[in-house]
Image (cartoon, helix red, strand yellow):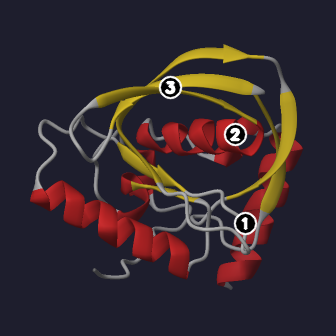
Amino acid sequence: MAILPILRYPNPQLREMGVPVSKVDDAIRTLVDDMAETMYDAPGVGIAAPQIGKLLRIFIIDIAGDDEPSDLKVFINPEITSLAGSLRWDEGCLSFPGATESIKRAESVTVRATGLDGKQFELEAVGLLAVAIQHENDHLDGVLMIDKLNPLGKRRLSRKVAKESG
């Protein structure tokens, strides 16, 4: 396992679309292990393959609290099949270190994906897990949290990022 560099905004690779994974094999399992080590080291609750420069449709999420056992969820070739409700959540992003913004998202989602075992599954999620699924899935399409903000919010977040990397 390895800790990989995380691409930071405004790296243009973050805007590229992930391509579907054709087969879940040892290379994909190793990539997921590396993504998990990178995410936990950062620390974060989710990371998508494009954030580490791998243009594949994979993301992982672990929303377990510090005092809870790990609950790593792996989503390969995910497809959000339904969205319901609405909420605002203060989101952070490993590609925007140190920044959080209030983002409007669906309150609940249903997602269909492939797991590390190569089998498809469907998951219904609410709250933080639903938000994290939407956030990480956006990365697979080159969509970033800054894209969800109004012009003032975009300027504010750009300043935060510049200050953080400055």
Q: Looking at the image, do the residues carrying marks 1 and 2 touch, with CB atoms under 8 Å apart?
A: no
Marks 1 and 2, the one that precedes in the sequence: 1
Q: Which residue is mark 2?
A: 131
Mark 2 secondary-structure assignment: helix
- Nearer the N terminus, badge 3 or badge 2? 3
Tag 3 and tag 2, C-beta contact below 8 Å: no
Q: CA distance from mark 3 to mark 2?
A: 12 Å
Q: Secondary structure at mark 1?
A: loop
Give the residue type at disc 3. Val
The residue at 44%/35% (across/down) is: 141
Q: Is residue 3 left or right of residue 24?
A: right
In three-dimensional space, the C-alpha distance between marks 1 and 2, rounded to whole angstroms, equals 16 Å
Residue nearer the viewer, 67 or 94: 67
Q: Please give the residue where the numbered disc 1 appears in the rendered image.
A: 65
- The spot of residue 79 in percent (x, y) is 43, 24
x%, y% of residue 144? 59, 45
The residue type indicated by label 1 comes to Gly
Category of crowding for the residue at label 2, using alpha-carbon neighbours closer than 10 angstroms: few (below 14), some (14–19), many (at least 20): many
Q: Which type of secondary structure does the marked residue at label 3 adopt?
A: strand
Q: Is residue 69 visible?
A: yes
Which numbered circle lies on residue 97?
A: none
Vertical comparison of 120 with 38: above or below: above
**Residue kind at label 2, given as amino acid type:** Val
Residue 23 or residue 50, whichever sits in front: 23
- Residue underneath mark 3: 111
The structure residue drawn at horizontal position 80% and vertical position 60%, both measured from the top left corner, is: 100
10 Å crowding of disc 3: few (<14), some (14-19), many (20+): many
Residue 147 shows up from this direction: no
Which label sits in the foreground, 1 or 3? 1
User: Between tags 3 and 2, which lies in front?
Assistant: 3
Above-or-below relation of 5 to 88 = below
